[in-house]
Amino acid sequence: MNIRMDLPEKEKLDYLNLQKGFLGEKKFDEYLSNLSKDWTVLNDLLLETNNTSYQIDSLCIHSETNYLFEVKNYEGDFYIENDTWYSLSGKEITNPLQQLHRIESLFRRFIKSSGFNYSIESYLIFINPEFHLYNAPRNLQIVFPPQINRFMKNLENKSSNLAKNHTKLVDRLLASHMQVSPYKRIPKYTLNDLKKGITCMKCQSFYTSFIRKTLECSYCAHKEDVTNAVLRSIAELTILFPETKITTKIIHEWCKNIPFQTIQRIISKNFNLFGHGKSAYYVK
């Protein structure tokens, strides 16, 4: 949506914050991917305890311990004064440690009510190397950017003792994961609100050049096979409009500068036709 329409100022800010947080979580996932097979890693768990929903950025299960991580991609200088967090400009911000403690408390209740007896260690991970926190007490559950490599090595060196009900806990967590987030805030939009065309995979600008079977970006010169680009664009359309039925006409309008015959060829080769006549559409 951000690429295809002008978001209102508030939604634009929300999007940028979400994007920054997502990039931070992806960066931390790279560290977690180096853990041995003795570890079970679950990301973006959305749970509910006592009618209160909460999200766990990363949960690592090892032996008899659950390691709960809240990842922050803050950038710049911050300080703590009387347990209150501020940016260097003096603006008060939400205390991320309180957020971590809230999640840990709710998760601890979830574990106990599910009949398990695991210990929990929770940490606040600051992933951005451009982050600094002044006046931070030494005993906080915080891992700062220069400490991450050493922290991960300590995790890797922990001895393995696979709990008997390890698999049962994972199954319980996956079964309890909420598929629809109550925090989702998406502005209203229609197909007519969105700019049509295929976006470049590299720079997200719109392709304008189509030569034979290749699309070329006029901004970054990235090239992409037209079949891959059209299929990627169809996937984008179905995310934005899950109820929309795939037809050659709709996809031709959505992709804009691709010849109708090319769209028809790509769809017929990669989808199955359902129905007959004007009501026919394609399914995967």
Image: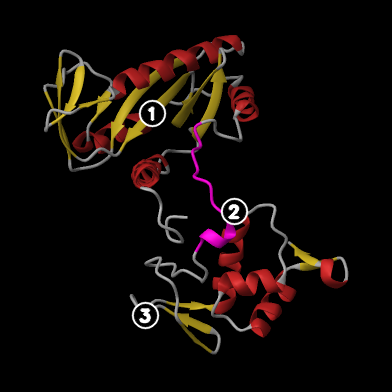
Please tell me the numbered disc located at residue 218. Answer: 3
* Labels 3 and 2 touching (C-beta < 8 A): no
Q: CA distance from mark 3 to mark 1?
A: 41 Å
Q: Amino acid at mark 3?
A: Ser
Q: Position of residue 7 (x, y in %)?
A: 41, 52
Using the image, tell me which numbered label, if any, was put on residue 77.
none
| Front: mark 3 or 1 | 3
> Quick check: 18 above or below 111?
below
Mark in front: 2 vs 1: 2
- Secondary structure found at label 3: loop
Please tell me which residue is depicted at 48% across the width and 13% down the height of the picture. Answer: 108
Q: Position of residue 149 (x, y in %)?
A: 26, 38
Q: Which image quarter: residue 174?
A: top right
Q: CA distance from mark 2 to mark 1?
A: 29 Å
Which quarter shows the C terminus? bottom right
Q: Nearer the viewer, residue 125 or 266?
A: 266
- Considering only order in the chain, which callout, 2 or 3, is on the residue closer to the N terminus? 3
Residue at (55%, 85%) from the top-left corner?
Answer: 213
Task: Specify the amino acid type for callout 1.
Answer: Phe
Q: Is residue 205 visible?
A: yes
Distance from disc 3 to disc 2, alpha carbons, whole Å, reads 26 Å
In the rendered structure, which amino acid carries the disc numbered 2?
Ile
Q: Which residues are magenta?
A: 183-194
**Residue where numbered disc 2 is placed:** 239
Membership of 188 in magenta stretch: yes
Residue 45 vs 19, above or below: the answer is above
At 63% from the left edge and 57% from the top edge, which residue is drawn?
A: 238
On screen, residue 169 versus residue 86, left or right, reads right
Q: Does the magenta portion include 121?
A: no
- Residue of label 1: 69
The image shows residue 59 at horizontal and vertical percentages of 46, 29
> In the image, is residue 7 above or below residue 210?
above
